[in-house]
Amino acid sequence: MAEPIVELTDRMRDIFGRVIEAYLERGTPVGSKVLAGAINLSPASIRGVMQELEERGLLTHPHTSAGRIPTERGLRLFVDGIMQTAAPDPRERMEIERQIVRDQPIEDALAAASAALSGLSACAGIVLAPKQELILRQLSFVPLDRGRALAVLVGADGSVENRIVPLDDGTTSDALTEVSNFVNARLSGLTLDEAQARLRAEIRERKEAIDATAAELVASGLAAWSQDHSRRPVLIVRGQANLIDPGAAEDLDRVRMLLDELEEAQEIARLLEGARDAPGCRIFIGSENRMFALSGSSVIAAPYRGSQGQVVGVVGVIGPTRLNYARVVPMVDFTAKALTRLMA
């Protein structure tokens, strides 16, 4: 747990805040000489305070450098107790509003929001989008070998998904064609849940135009597909290249780990879910979240709402712990509010 800010003296608080602000701006360890010009104290006195802050676990010094950098604990104390945020810069606000416009599909608006945040923050922009139910357009079966077929599902949005399904002995190609024709004639245009419910009802009422075994095959397949879609996060990530900045050459292993982590959509979605109930922005710093413990990355995220006031998604950025939190937090918060207005 971070040390309560009230337990720091005014001098400690002042020097602590200046060290972090200088580090976030420069990205290098901060020495006493950097602060001496702005504080009416000798470098020796400043070093003494910095040493005390290090003993409290708020600062550390890498390698043999005489300068200090904040620990994750120190960053958390700074973010929660010292940092002051303001409204986004007018130019940043205009850029976000320019990209999030009403005359475009919501999916494009969400992608634009992610891209805008990425460009303005020099981080990776992320959006956890509302789940949309897949509408069935076509289902076909391609025989593979005895006892197996490839089921090809085409959604109304043009998406295509394949799955290998088991077959009962004796199932012929003609029978698979009959099943496909039935599905496309009777279930096309329905969501997966609706198609499953209608087929189950027809099985119960013995109205199905295919035999019961084939109908059960389709029903179980639709159920599995529907379950997959309900669990699958809709995650939009833009600007991964921003994470490879000029200073990254000194820390390529961390960057590689972060880029690998960004491929884990399910894990990122779980992390963002933790921001759904937040009244505003939530900030996850480094090892506070298991996923980014190794890469030492930070996440700033805020929920956005739908037309009924319900939380429908989360928007934010992922970047190094050396983020300009005071600038990026209001930027993310403004983007979340812009998306909420778009969906009202």
Image: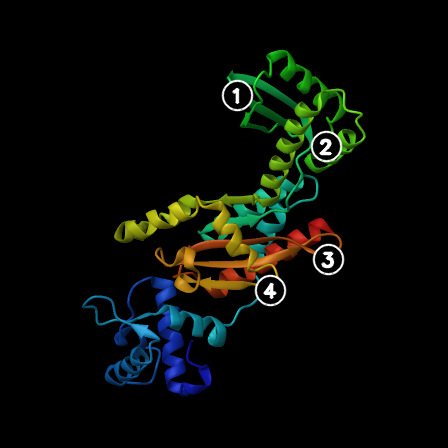
Disc 2 or 4, which lies upstream in sequence?
2
Say what secondary structure mark 3 lies in. loop
Whether 127 is drawn above or below 154: the answer is: below
Disc 3 or 4, which lies upstream in sequence?
4
Residue located beneath label 2 in the image: 195
Q: Position of residue 254 (x, y in %)?
A: 32, 52
> Does the CB distance between marks 2 and 1 fall below 8 Å?
no
Say what secondary structure mark 2 lies in. helix
Say what secondary structure mark 1 lies in. loop
Which mark's residue is nearer the viewer, 1 or 4?
Answer: 1
Q: Position of residue 338 (x, y in %)?
A: 65, 54
The numbered mark at residue 309 is 3
Residue located beneath label 1 in the image: 147
Q: Quadrant of residue 25?
A: bottom left
Real-space Cα separation, disc 2 to disc 1, in angstroms = 25 Å
Q: What amino acid is at disc 1?
A: Gly
Real-space Cα separation, disc 3 to disc 1, in angstroms = 49 Å
The reply, left or right, for residue 29 in relation to residue 135 is left
- Residue 89 visible from this viewpoint: no
Q: Position of residue 291 (x, y in %)?
A: 42, 55
The reply, left or right, for residue 41 in relation to residue 77 is left
Which mark's residue is nearer the viewer, 2 or 3?
Answer: 2
Disc 1 or 4, which lies upstream in sequence?
1
Which mark's residue is nearer the viewer, 2 or 1?
Answer: 1
The reply, left or right, for residue 271 in relation to residue 100 is left
Whether 288 is drawn above or below 147: the answer is: below
Real-space Cα separation, disc 2 to disc 3, in angstroms = 30 Å
Disc 3 or 1, which lies upstream in sequence?
1
Q: What amino acid is at disc 2?
A: Ala
